Image (cartoon, rainbow, N blue to C red):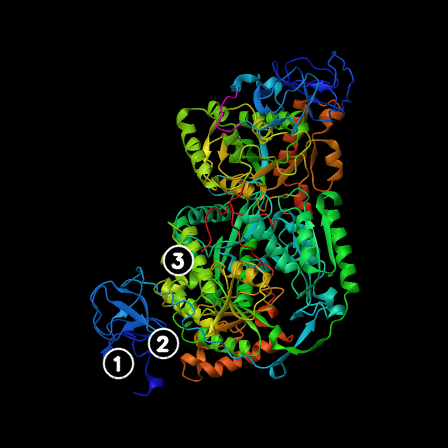
Amino acid sequence: MNELKNPFIRLDPADNVVVARTEVPAGTAVPNEGFTTQQLVPPGHKVATCPIARGEPVLKYNTVIGFAGEDLVPGTWMHSHNIQFGDLEKDYRYSQDYRPLPVLPPEQRACFLGIVRPDGRVATRNYIGIFAASHRAATVVRKIAAAFDATVLQTHAHIDGVAPFVHEQGAGTELSGEPLMVLRRTLVGYIAHPNIYAALIVASGDEDNTAHELLEQARQQAGDMPLLSLNIADAGGTRSAIEQGVGLVRKLVETAPVPERQPVSVEHIIVGLQCGGSDGFSGLSANPALGAAMELLIANGGTAILSETPEIYGVEHLLTARAVTPQVGRKLVDRIEWWLRYNAGRDTQINGRVSPGNNAGGLANVIEKSLGGAKKGGNAPLMEVYEYAEPVTTRGLVFMDTPGYDPVSATGQIAGGANMVCFTTGRGSCFGSVPAPTMKLSSNTPMYRRMEADMDVNCGVIIDGESTIPQMGQHIFEQLLRHASGEPTKSELAGVGLNEFIPWPMGVVD
Amino acid sequence: MTFNDSSSGNCPEFVVQHTGDDVGIALRELPAGDVLADGLQVGTHTVPEAHKIALHAIPAGAPIVKKNRIIALATRDISKGDWVHIHNVTDADPDLHVSKARHSSDMDISSANLPMVPNTFQGYRRADGRVGTRNFIAVCVAGNCAATAARRISEWFTPERLAPYPNVGGVIPLTHEFGCGMEMTGEPMDMLRRTLAASVRHPNVAGAVIVALGCERNNIYGFMEQEGLQVGPALQTVVLQEVGGTLSAVQQGVAAVKAMLPEANRARREAAPVSALTVGVMSHGLDGYAALTSTPAVALACDALVQAGGSIASADTPSVIRLADEVRARTITPKAAAPLLERLQWWREHHRGHDTRLRPGRLPQGLPTGISTMREQSALALDAMGHTPLQGMVAYGQSIPQAGWTHVDSPAYEAVSATGLVASGATLLCLATGLGSSFGAALSPTVKLATHTELYRRWADDIDLDAGVMLNHGIGARQMAQHIIDAWIKHANGEQTHNETLGVGSDEFAPWPVGVLA
């Protein structure tokens, strides 16, 4: 049988399952593999290729993703009902597979059109940001920003937007410790982001995340950028605060220089890697293709941030083995262990159960999801491990600890300096982000066709046999550079990104 | 100047709220060394307006009693006439339940003392018998991933587009930050689902559209099944992954809302018994003035509404924790008190190891004028609920089953507690503030009340009522309570509160996040 006509994809010779490209009816014979399907197999789901005894490991990509829940005959549909999530042996093999990825000399590196800031950092977009110190300032922030809609900015085309950054924290929160620190670090990371030309901080005047502290930290990290603040209580309430804020932002808009995009090295690109609404195809198409693109980016001096810590759980040993030093590998293991404590006793995915969408898409458990997810970083060595929203200063593939929850994760990456986000999806996420834009990669063609207005790249062509992973990697890399140079992504065209700023809420509400 | 609820000697410079109190409240700044009308000499430090003055010597470690309850402990010896504040007092250990019991019959609440409440108000009678004060269409999200689509749907309905439907108050987005990346089962999901469901079923909501991405952990179909919600003319769903993405979902959502408008517009206000009103009573930044102004006035308004058969609801469980003994004594039966007392244990666990205002010695946010301890502030919040017994507690977002005073378990933070009060059934909110507030809930009008006139003037656009007139114009608590009742009724009848006029509300829907992220 022609490989391309085989309704199943085999990922590794050692595997005892294969993955359905499309829905496969019961009773379909697959001579190459030597089985006939026993049940209907949904697209992206797996089938046993040989007898698997109860308790025997299930292998995908030659990695244990679980254990058979019962004795299974060849052709049996395999999913969360007969794959048990169990304890896995972990052999971290710190740095034993570390191989440096050769980076091109500077003069040979690819270029894109970036906006060079006075301090030498490079932006991919040019925004004015209005930041709420706490949830109490949210309405005022939104209404100030709303005064600068597309019509107003028509005469200032060099400004991509006046963006509100609101959230539900900062008041009625813990008074010291990690929750406030993380909130501040995230806000400061955004304020100081190269894609933010100027910022206005709005505070109510009585919150826990005081404007004073926030301004001080922002000044330290942001240097000379125009940075203003406004206090609603001092201004005399909502209406006055909005008026004053509009006046302040108008001045920022009118005095903003017109930046010229110039050819700069791709080494200035920092990509935040995300997957959301993953399905059984994500790990076969979009994630490995993105990984190939990231290897190209890294070879050209750039940086890729892998995150979503619960979604590499189960395959972290693949990353620790590629860590540049055992210390870096150990940091990753520390974060995993923190997560196991943070989520202990809770019905969350690190304890096995993935979301209903993941499950419907063919992912039996978090290990299988992680196996596919970790491919977003390709085979690049792991150069550093960062905490949430910490500034990313190392080049190459790095890891930033974040939840799996997409908006929170992307917010941390952007706070750390990501100026692009690449987001793979199987079920069809409609995510978008500001001030660093998100480009979305679909794992399968049917979803791409259904949701083309939200998708930037269709990696489903890999599943369809029409392209290879390296080919798509090159395609993604080239499109990434176009988006970094100013070409809007679908989510930017759809106006998505102003409700997705969610700093990691860590504490309890008072 | 007299105050209905202070029983002992008054003089123009300070007020003593109860016989046996250790402190009085300064009505104006009391300069150091001045000899006051009744012979009390101010100590070596000026006592600022609305702050406390010691009526006699208090040794270090002794409790400070104000309005017949312990609000603090002295941290050093205090002399008669001294300024009493954070420099010489601290919060009583919350486990030290030594409050002198206050009885609900502390005050005569016969009709002669209470403001008048009309028999009816003009509300929207719903099919299930509940009565709304507003008539909105809500666009709610199962998870954050649908938030942008939901906002764009609601924003499409500008005042011009709604003009043909004058009886529809607006199309309100109910977006939030959760719904995915969270615990799939257990309290966090149950609470979120309960809050969302109660919000779309609220008497102020004529129809709702629930928007979801499709793959979120708060799966829309699971959610609707768990909450007994069914698609129909007044409840529609839009799933982005089913309809082809953001733009398509916005189109479909707009169409779904449009289809609901004619029927929603047929709703008319009609006379409904005032007993159908549920007022959520809240506060933000109560200060030293509140003891003399907003608290006694709101208390009488609450008493009047309860006497007329209506419901009042408190939020802010931390305040209950600080005065647990007193609250237990005020609850109608031990059986009714049991769930509340059990829940207090959950709170202690939930906050253990976290640096929150439940830690003894922590100060109120913004440190309002003249407030020295959290306990002092919490007492002002609780006193504002009036003199009727507490009927019981409901969980956050759970329907209030009875008339009278019910406590809705929630944090103090106003956006989160208001979201719970509304979900539990509040059709009007009343928020007293000493610091100023822009707040207004998404679905129920919020009547805001300043504790003092200078604040009211500074926040004139945001705050509806000035309780400071009780200090400046000799208006008594009963008369102020009448102003409050009148305001509640007129806003329930449709007049916009300041927050509604300013368009504050669509960012204030904030379900209580109790879990961890995943």
Q: Give the CA separation, mark 3 to mark 1.
A: 33 Å
Q: Residue at x 64, y 37 (%)?
A: B447
The residue identified by callout 3 is A350
Asked whether A358 or B272 is in front, the reply is A358
Mark sitting earlier along the chain (1/2) = 2
Where is residue B315? Give x, y as percent: 53, 36
User: Are tags 2 and 3 found on a single chain?
Assistant: yes
Q: Chain of mark 2?
A: A
Question: Given this view, does label 3 or label 1 mark the residue nearer the observer?
Answer: 3
Disc 1 crowd rating (10 Å Cα; few below 14, some 14-19, many 20+) is some
| Residue B98 is a magenta residue | yes
Residue depicted at x 47% and y 77%: A289
Q: Is residue B227 above or below residue B446?
A: below
Label 3: state its secondary structure.
helix
Which amino acid type corresponds to the residue marked 1 in the rendered image?
Answer: Glu
The type of residue carrying mark 2 is Thr
Label whose residue precedes the other's in the sequence (3 or 1): 1
- What span is colored magenta in the figure? B93-99
The Cα–Cα distance between marks 2 and 3, rounded to whole angstroms, is: 28 Å
Give me the disc on residue A22. Answer: 2
